[in-house]
C-alpha cells in the first residue's frame, strides 16, 4: 500500500488507479479521466518512455491534459503548453460541520453550476464533473450562489474542489460553510480531506487554514500535449 506522501504527491494517479477507476481511460499504465469529467492524466511515479508513448496514444493528436510534473523537460514528442504552481493543503485534523442550507447538487443542476463556474473561475469544471459526487450548493431565491464539492478520490483521502461564491454574495462566509459541510461528508466515510489552491490566493489559503487545513507542499501542474 503506498504511503500517504506517495498518494498525495501523485493524486490523479492514486485516484484513477483506485477509487476513481470508473471514470478512468487507460492505455498501458497511462491513465486519464474521461474528457468530460476532468482534464487530468497521470503516469506512475516510475514512468518509463513506454508509459509516455501510451499516454500519447490515450490523449491523441490535438489533445492535451494536465498532470503533476516536476517541471523537468518533457520527453521527446511532448510539448508543455503551460505550467501552474499550486499549493496542496491537507486537512487530516479538520472535522467539518453540517450545514442545513447546503443541498446536494446533481445532473439537473449542471446548467446552474456551469453558470456559477463561468462567473467565478474556481478551476476546471466540465459537464460531467458533478458525477464525481459530493457537490453541495446554496441557493437564494432559486439562484445557485455558492458551491463546493469533491473531485479526486484517493485511498483514504478526498479532494475538496470547486469552492466558489458569486461575486455579489461574497463576504457572507458561504465558502467556509460549504467547505466545512463537504469536509463533514468526507469524514463520515472515514476519509481525510485535501485540496489545492493557487499560491497567490492568500485569502483562500487563510480560510482553509482557519478550518484546520495545513500547507503540505507545492506541486506543478503541467498541461502537456503529444506531437501530432
Image: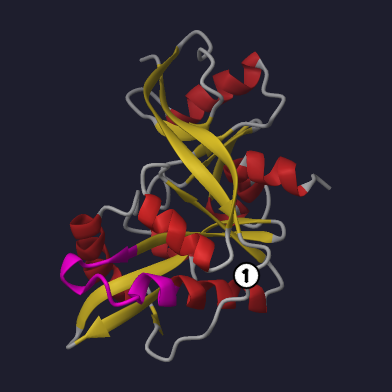
Tell whether 79 sits left or right of 49: left
Tell whether 115 sits left or right of 222: left
Q: How is the image coloured?
A: secondary structure
The residue at 61%/52% (across/down) is: 21
The residue at 51%/15% (across/down) is: 74
Tell whether 150 sits left or right of 101: right
Q: Which residues are magenta?
A: 164-178
- How many marks on residues? 1
**Residue at the far right in the pictured view:** 1
Q: Mark 1 highlights which residue?
A: 94
Task: Using the image, determine if residue 202 lies above or below residue 174.
Answer: above
Using the rendered view, name the quadrant where residue 27 is placed: top right
Magenta span has 175? Answer: yes
Task: Using the image, determine if residue 62 lies above or below residue 32.
Answer: above
Depth check: give the residue in front, 220 or 94: 94
Indicate the quadrant containing the C terminus: top left, top right, bottom left or bottom right: top left
In the image, residue 161 lies at what x, y percent?
45, 59
**Residue at the far bottom in the pictured view:** 100
Task: Using the image, determine if residue 89 lies above or below residue 150.
Answer: above
The residue at 40%/20% (across/down) is: 80
**Residue at the far top in the pictured view:** 76
Q: Element under label 1?
A: loop
In the image, residue 11 lies at what x, y percent?
61, 45
Q: Residues within 10 Å of mark 1 (few under 14, many from 20)?
A: many
Magenta span has 17? Answer: no
The residue at 42%/42% (across/down) is: 199
Amino acid at each position: 500500500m503506498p504511503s500517504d506522501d506517495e498518494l498525495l504527491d501523485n493524486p490523479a494517479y492514486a485516484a484513477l488507479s483506485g477509487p476513481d477507476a470508473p471514470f478512468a481511460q487507460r492505455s498501458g499504465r497511462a491513465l486519464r479521466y474521461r474528457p468530460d469529467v476532468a482534464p487530468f492524466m497521470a503516469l506512475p511515479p516510475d514512468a518509463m518512455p513506454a508509459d509516455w508513448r501510451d499516454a500519447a496514444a490515450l490523449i491523441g493528436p490535438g489533445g492535451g491534459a494536465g498532470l503533476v510534473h516536476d517541471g523537468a523537460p518533457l520527453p521527446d514528442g511532448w510539448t508543455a503548453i503551460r505550467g501552474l504552481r499550486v499549493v496542496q493543503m491537507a486537512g487530516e485534523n479538520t472535522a467539518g460541520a453540517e450545514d442545513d442550507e447546503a443541498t446536494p447538487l446533481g445532473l439537473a443542476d449542471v446548467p446552474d453550476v456551469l453558470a456559477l463556474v463561468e462567473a467565478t473561475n474556481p478551476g476546471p469544471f466540465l459537464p460531467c464533473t458533478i458525477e464525481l459526487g459530493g457537490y453541495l450548493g446554496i441557493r437564494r431565491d432559486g439562484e445557485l450562489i455558492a458551491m463546493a464539492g469533491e473531485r479526486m478520490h484517493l485511498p483514504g483521502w478526498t479532494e475538496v474542489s470547486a469552492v466558489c461564491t458569486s461575486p455579489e454574495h461574497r463576504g457572507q462566509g458561504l465558502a467556509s460553510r460549504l467547505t466545512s459541510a463537504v469536509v463533514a461528508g468526507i469524514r463520515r466515510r472515514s476519509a481525510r480531506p485535501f485540496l489545492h489552491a493557487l499560491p497567490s490566493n492568500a485569502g483562500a489559503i487563510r480560510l482553509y487554514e482557519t478550518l484546520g487545513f495545513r500547507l503540505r507542499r507545492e506541486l506543478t501542474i503541467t498541461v502537456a500535449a503529444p506531437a501530432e
